[in-house]
Image (tube, helix red, strand yellow):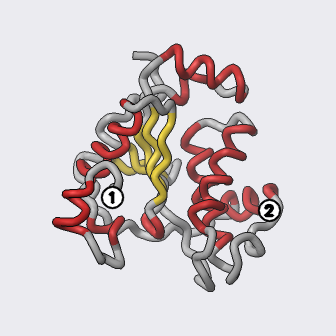
């Protein structure tokens, strides 16, 4: 936000301890879409305890090339706008939480997971991270993170104003107004 929409950041959000919660959903969507227009196939914006936004390109050629490399089903990833909430965690420290969340997303993609599950797992890895004081000590083995999520790990309630977004409780994911459900358009 500071790099691409500095005026918005400086005028409205500078110095806020809860920057993510103050962002309006349209601001967040516009920021992610501007990064997609710059050429990214997928944009992940870590939002602290508000979760992580994923916005993906609708460019079929770009996605097919990436999907071939990562063994993903491109149809599931094209033109998505989704946000899983963060998980409730015993907060010890936040050092490395964003990096661990990103690593969780990349790991999930390398495992060929669909975007909803990949983002959920990314949020879970970030949630594990904050339960230790350093950058990586809180991260258990992948299968242990999966087991914790599958056992019903509770989400934090978002404080973001997600107007126009829909919540799907079965998947534990917010779907943005630009989300096309992984359909080829």
User: 71 or 116: nearer the eye?
Assistant: 71
- Single out the residue that lies furthest toward the left: 11
The numbered mark at residue 129 is: none
Asked if residue 86 lies left or right of residue 117, the reply is left
Q: Quadrant of residue 36?
A: top left
User: 181 or 23: nearer the eye?
Assistant: 23
Residue at figure coordinates x 53%, y 30% from the top left: 77
Residue at figure coordinates x 34%, y 43% from the top left: 176
Q: Which residue is mark 1?
A: 2
Q: Which residue is mark 2?
A: 144
- Residue 88: % across, % down: 55, 74
Count of numbered circles in the view: 2
Find numbered disc 1 in the image and state the secondary structure of the residue it sits on.
loop
The answer to whether residue 181 of the structure is visible from this angle is no
- Vertical arrangement, residue 138 with respect to residue 75, above or below: below
- Residue 100: % across, % down: 65, 61
């Amino acid at each position: 936000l500071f790099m691409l929409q500095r005026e918005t950041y400086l005028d409205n959000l500078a110095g806020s301890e809860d920057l993510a919660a103050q962002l309006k959903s349209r601001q967040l969507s516009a920021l992610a879409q501007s990064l997609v227009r710059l050429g990214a196939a997928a944009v992940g914006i870590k939002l602290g305890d508000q979760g992580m936004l994923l916005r993906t390109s609708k460019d079929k050629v770009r996605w097919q090339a990436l999907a071939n490399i990562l063994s993903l089903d491109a149809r599931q990833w094209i033109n998505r706008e989704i946000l899983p909430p963060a998980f409730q965690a015993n907060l010890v420290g936040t050092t490395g939480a964003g990096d661990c969340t990103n690593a969780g997303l990349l790991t999930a993609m390398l495992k060929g997971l669909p975007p909803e599950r990949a983002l959920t797992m990314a949020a879970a890895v970030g949630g594990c991270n904050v339960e230790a004081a350093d950058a990586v000590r809180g991260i258990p083995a992948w299968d242990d993170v999966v087991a914790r999520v599958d056992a019903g790990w509770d989400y934090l309630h978002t404080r973001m104003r997600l107007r126009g977004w829909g919540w799907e409780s079965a998947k534990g994911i917010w779907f943005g107004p630009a989300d096309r459900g992984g359909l080829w358009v």
